[in-house]
Image (spheres, helix red, strand yellow):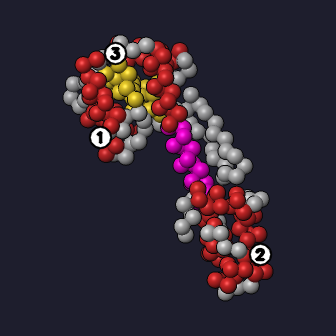
């Protein structure tokens, strides 16, 4: 599934996101195959993994997306895989698959950060609802990160004096107060303000403030 992220005019532009992949983790080959076929029929890309250990071996090269993980597997189970993914800094959403007797484990998984669980025997709607919610969360997270990165790059293009002026404008100070605090003339503040607005691609102070906040610059 390829998704293009679009941003409002007040946000720095972000690039098109790469295709997202649903990573199916189950020791049952038939289950892996049927889930992959189901997702493919709805236009969703997937990769299958026969064990938690296989996922971890490939973790650095896995495509972004989400995980659908069977909670009962030989060796490392779904809960242990979820914990290890977090320990390694992988924050892709996890949907756990559980049998009726394992609902308590699924609840534990959700308390530990899993997005959802689907109970066997599950319907197509159950799977698609959970997977689409997980992929949407991934897109939202990637979009936020991309916006922040773009905003930080714009802020980095400013001179130290322009950043000084922007920091005070973000705090709501008028030009005369900014001039007094920095020991420069109001006219010089206006020049720095015009320059920074041009570099940030902003038409209003509100737009500049949004970029500064996106970049984590509001408390500068």
Is residue 57 at all visible to an observer of this figure? no
Residue visible at 73% across and 71% down in the picture? 193
Q: What whole-number distance in Å separates the C-alpha atoms at marks 3 and 1?
A: 24 Å
Between the residue at mark 2 and the residue at mark 1, the CA separation in whole angstroms equals 52 Å
First to last magenta residue range: 138-152
- With respect to residue 212, does 30 lie above or below? above
Q: Quadrant of the N terminus?
A: top right
Q: Secondary structure at mark 1?
A: helix
First along the sequence among labels 3 and 2: 3
Residue 133 x %, y %: 50, 30
Tell whether position 163 is magenta.
no
Q: Residue 85's quadrant in the figure? A: top left
Measuring from the top left, give residue 158's x and y in whole percent: 65, 69
148 within the magenta span: yes
Q: Residues within 10 Å of mark 2 (few under 14, many from 20)?
A: few
Extreme residue toward the left, this view: 75
Residue 48, which numbered label? Answer: none
Query: In the image, what residue occupies the spot 78% across and 80% down?
Result: 187
Residue occupied by mark 2: 191
* x and y percentages locating residue 198 in the rendered image: 75, 64
**Viewer-side residue, 151 vs 49:** 151
Residue at the far bottom in the pictured view:
183
| Other-residue count near label 1 (Cα within 10 Å), few / some / many at <14 / 14–19 / ≥20 | some
Which of the numbered marks, if any, corresponds to residue 120?
Answer: 3
Q: Is residue 96 visible?
A: yes
Q: Which comes sooner in the sequence, label 3 or label 1?
A: 1
73 to the left or right of 61: left
Residue 84: image tag = 1
- Mark 3 or mark 1, whichever is nearer to me: 3
């Amino acid at each position: 599934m390829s998704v293009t992220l679009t941003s409002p005019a007040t946000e720095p532009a972000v690039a098109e996101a790469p295709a997202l992949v649903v990573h199916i983790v189950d020791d049952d080959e038939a289950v892996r195959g049927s889930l992959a076929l189901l997702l493919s029929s709805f236009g969703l890309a997937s990769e299958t993994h026969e064990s938690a250990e296989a996922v971890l071996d490939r973790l650095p090269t896995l495509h972004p997306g989400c995980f659908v993980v069977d909670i009962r597997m030989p060796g490392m189970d779904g809960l242990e895989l979820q914990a290890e993914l977090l320990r390694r800094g992988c924050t892709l959403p996890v949907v756990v698959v559980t049998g009726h007797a394992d609902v308590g484990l699924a609840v534990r998984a959700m308390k530990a950060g899993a997005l959802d669980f689907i109970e066997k025997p599950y319907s197509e709607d159950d799977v698609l609802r959970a997977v689409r919610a997980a992929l949407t969360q991934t897109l939202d997270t990637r979009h936020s990160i991309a916006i922040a990165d773009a905003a930080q790059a714009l802020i980095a293009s400013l001179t130290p004096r322009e950043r000084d002026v922007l920091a005070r404008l973000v705090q709501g100070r008028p030009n005369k107060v900014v001039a007094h605090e920095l020991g420069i003339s109001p006219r010089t503040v206006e020049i720095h303000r015009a320059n920074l607005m041009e570099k940030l691609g902003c038409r209003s102070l509100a737009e500049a403030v949004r970029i500064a906040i996106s970049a984590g610059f509001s408390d500068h």
